[in-house]
Image: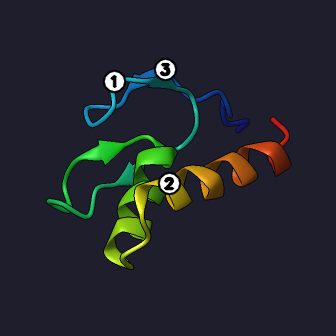
Amino acid sequence: MKKNNQMKQRICPRCGSTYHTAPALSRADNKTFICPDCGTREALESMGVELSEQEKILESIHSCHCE
């Protein structure tokens, strides 16, 4: 049986952006699904990475990621 690899459109409750990739589980409550970028931000926040550096890291991730 062939599976449908298409992901449904979701809206991130943390930032409000629309995304189509697999969600991340929020570290805040371990229940809420959030967009991958917010998941990355939460992980970086937990390590004490400053907001400006978080944005640089996400920019780097996006520039290397081909969809």
**Dot in front, 1 or 2:** 2
Q: Which residue is mark 3?
A: 9
Question: Where does residue 47 sit, x and y in percent of width and height?
Answer: 39, 79
Cα separation between marks 2 and 3 = 28 Å
**Element under disc 3:** loop
- Residue 33 higher or lower than 14, as above or below: below
Q: Which residue is mark 1?
A: 16
- In screen coordinates, is 54 left or right of 38? right
Query: What residue lies at 81% left-to-right and 35% top-to-bottom?
Result: 67
Question: Where does residue 11 sit, x and y in percent of width and height?
Answer: 37, 23
- In screen coordinates, is 29 left or right of 52? left
Which amino acid type corresponds to the residue marked 2 in the rendered image?
Ser
- Residue 63 higher or lower than 6, as above or below: below
Cα separation between marks 1 and 2 = 20 Å
Residue at the bottom extreme of this rendering: 47
- Residue 22 higher or lower than 24, as above or below: above
Query: What residue lies at 22% left-to-right and 47% top-to-bottom?
Result: 32
Disc 1, disc 2: CB below 8 Å? no
Which amino acid type corresponds to the residue marked 3 in the rendered image?
Gln
First along the sequence among labels 1 and 3: 3
Marker disc for residue 55 = none
Which amino acid type corresponds to the residue marked 1 in the rendered image?
Gly
Q: Residues within 10 Å of mark 2 (few under 14, many from 20)?
A: few
First along the sequence among labels 2 and 3: 3
Cα separation between marks 1 and 3 = 12 Å
Q: Which image quarter: residue 25? A: bottom left
